[in-house]
Image (cartoon, rainbow, N blue to C red):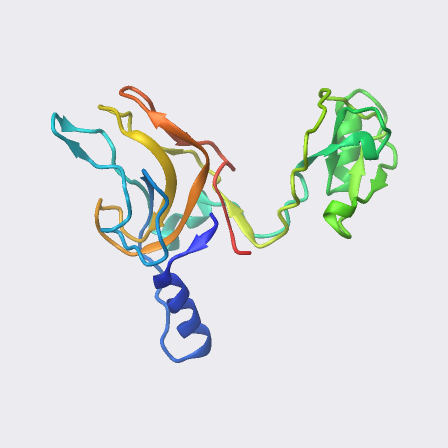
């Protein structure tokens, strides 16, 4: 989730630096948008997928995540350090083979990978890369190649201060063609066309939704972070 709305930005600034408190939302809802929302949007003006068409219900509605004060811990992982994420690094910088290998932020995770590969865990190799600054990566002694690629690129280290969903977020099945779904929005109201926009982002993989399609975010697929 990349951008904060004007509503949330002003609320946070006034809460931190002035006397006006920012009240915790009593609802969190996830919405899908045909285009990317704007900072100045609210729940009525975001380009949200419609709930009705000329032929009746589209089957679309926001996903109600509920009251974060009551069930937030069951919907979101803890905020903090993600030490278990495997990084896909172009291993030419490791052994010039042209293969992908799993690298880890946690030394114990790299050693666990050795154990999973049937080897006795040993001290993991440490690697640093110019693209990732001072971040230290750990490679298992038994490197497990996952494929050859001519230009795999880099999966950037995400840092700390983010949360990911700990439960699936599933939208209702489309009863008509929704067209392109290009963005996502988080609001403080589960009713279509209502509430304040909190955050929004463009989807990494926009898709065209046809009748019968179902959109969901698997566990850890939706990440919210502040940059």
User: As drawn, is 183 to the left or to the right of 114?
Assistant: left
Residue at 35 percent of width and 26 percent of height: 208
Figure check: 121 above or below 184 = above
Q: Position of residue 145 (x, y in %)?
A: 76, 22
User: As drawn, is 153 to the left or to the right of 117?
Assistant: left
User: As drawn, is 205 to the left or to the right of 159?
Assistant: left
Would you say residue 171 is visible in this rendering?
Answer: no
Between 213 and 152, the one lying in front of the other is: 152
Figure check: 214 above or below 195 = above
Q: Position of residue 92 (x, y in %)?
A: 81, 30
Q: Position of residue 14 (x, y in %)?
A: 40, 74
Residue 202 lies in what quarter of the image?
Answer: top left
**How many labels were placed on the picture?**
0
Q: Position of residue 120 (x, y in %)?
A: 86, 26
Would you say residue 181 is visible in this rendering?
Answer: yes
Between 152 and 75, the one lying in front of the other is: 152
Residue at 34 percent of width and 63 percent of height: 7
Figure check: 189 above or below 8 = above
Residue 180 lies in what quarter of the image?
Answer: top left
- Quarter of the figure with the C terminus: bottom right
Between 168 and 32, the one lying in front of the other is: 32
User: As drawn, is 101 to the left or to the right of 205?
Assistant: right
Q: Residue furthest bottom?
A: 19
């Amino acid at each position: 989730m990349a951008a904060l709305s004007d509503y949330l930005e002003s609320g946070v600034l006034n809460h931190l630096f002035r006397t006006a408190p920012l009240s915790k939302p009593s609802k969190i809802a996830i919405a899908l948008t045909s285009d990317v929302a704007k900072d100045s949007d609210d729940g009525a003006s975001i380009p949200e997928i419609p709930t009705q068409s000329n032929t009746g219900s589209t089957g679309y509605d926001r996903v109600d995540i509920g009251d974060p004060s009551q069930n937030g811990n069951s919907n979101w992982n803890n905020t903090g350090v993600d030490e278990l994420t495997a990084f896909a690094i172009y291993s030419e910088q490791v052994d010039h083979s042209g293969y992908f290998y799993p690298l880890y932020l946690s030394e114990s995770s790299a050693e666990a990978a050795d154990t999973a590969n049937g080897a006795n865990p040993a001290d993991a190799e440490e690697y640093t890369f110019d693209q990732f600054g001072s971040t230290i990566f750990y490679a298992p002694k038994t490197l497990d190649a996952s494929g050859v690629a001519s230009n795999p690129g880099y999966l950037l280290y995400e840092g700390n201060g983010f949360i990911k969903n700990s439960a699936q977020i599933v939208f209702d099945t489309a009863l008509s063609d929704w067209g392109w779904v290009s963005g996502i929005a988080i609001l403080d109201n589960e009713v279509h066309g209502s509430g304040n926009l909190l955050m929004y982002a463009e989807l990494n993989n926009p898709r065209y939704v046809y009748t019968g399609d179902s959109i969901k975010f698997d566990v850890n697929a939706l990440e919210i972070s502040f940059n």
